[in-house]
Image (spheres, rainbow, N blue to C red):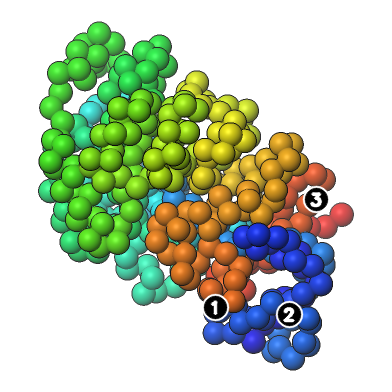
Amino acid sequence: MIEIKNGRIVTPDEIIEGRSLLIEDGVIQDICVFTGKADRTIDAHGRYILPGFIDVHSDKVEKFISPRPTAVFDYELALKECEKELLQLGITTIYHSFSLYETKAFGPCTMRNKESVARMAALLADIHNRNHLIHHRCHLRIEIDYLEAYDIAKSMMEQGLVHEISFMDHTPGQGQYRDLAIYEKSIDTSEATFEEILEEQRTKKTLSLAQLRELAGIAHAKGITVASHDDDTVEKLELNEKIGVDISEFPITIAVAKEASKRGYYTVVGAPNILLGGSHSGNMSAAEAINEGCGDILCSDYYPQAILHSIFTMHTKYGQPLPEMVKKATLNPAKAMKIDKEYGSIEIGKKADLSIVDILDGYPVITHVLVDGRPTSRVEYRR
């Protein structure tokens, strides 16, 4: 048994002080007055105790595999190095986002082809049978103009290799690239002119509504959450309803985010957006969405460090209650991913995925992490 004492325990509704956490067999057994009867005691020294973060959208592992276009490292080596960093950042469950797309407009990417995606999905499934630090999950991102993705996604879901799917449309003039000037800065024009790429994108074939609906149906039958990406109109939300989408990732405007929330979607915003003071592509402010009540889930997107810092930024700078902000990286994503019976909050009977957080020099820092009740990381700063 492990007992964590002298901590400020952040639950979904409040911050509890003067109580200890009792953990046995990987599960939170009690929140009680200090007993002193555990086999091991961890003194939190007045620091916050948070649930482990659940990151539903992250492509960080791509940078560990291929930090440069011509440098490709062993996939498992990269995953093991990546999870060490994620653990130190309090991320105990991650949905690695792997993209299936065909367009060459964004230039070559080692990871974003069917062979690499299949290889990584198989590795994630296998790593849990061997030594690992955190919970790895597969988020399969399906670009709707990649017609072959229909059969690939079906096969991967049938094999149990996928835990989340999302439908993406990066056609210029809508979604993330409503502003063609931003699109032009994002693409590779070394082999075709901007005008030629635009024409190709405007005339391309895409997966049909029936195919997307079928993929969503298979996902739901297997308990897999379905997300959309870069919703920019109410009409897009209505289309999502016909398909069977559960989550609206990165809605483009506040108005669309509010409508998505009103229609019962979980809305996902990027934590880096908060630290940068806005979207790097000129879209909706994540901080504004949260303050307006239409930002439900924080994800790291491309910068895992941002989750912890954005939580405390929203608390200290914007006055958001800390338990509410913590929920956006823990309980809310757990609910969206349908794992909240075991993960996502500090409650009796749930798995003890936890981090202990101190505030040093005005910044939140993680000193301890437990995964399934096992202490897996400890860092003590010195002066």
- Residue on which disc 1 sits: 349
307 shown above or below 146: below
Q: Label 2, label 3: how many angstroms apart (C-alpha)?
A: 28 Å
| Residue lying at 57% horizontally and 64% vertically, measured from the top left | 345
| Marked residue nearer the N-terminal end (2 or 1) | 2
Under mark 3, the amino acid is: Leu
Looking at the picture, tell me which residue is in the foreground, 320 or 70.
Answer: 320
Quarter residue 26 falls in: bottom right
| Residue lying at 27% horizontally and 23% vertically, measured from the top left | 171
Q: Quadrant of the C terminus?
A: bottom right
Q: Label 2, label 1: how many angstroms apart (C-alpha)?
A: 14 Å
Q: Where's residue 263, x and y in %?
A: 39, 40
| Residue lying at 52% horizontally and 40% vertically, measured from the top left | 295
Under mark 2, the amino acid is: Cys
Please give the label number shown on residue 32.
2
Q: Label 3, label 1: how many angstroms apart (C-alpha)?
A: 32 Å
Visible in this render: residue 371?
yes
Under mark 1, the amino acid is: Gly
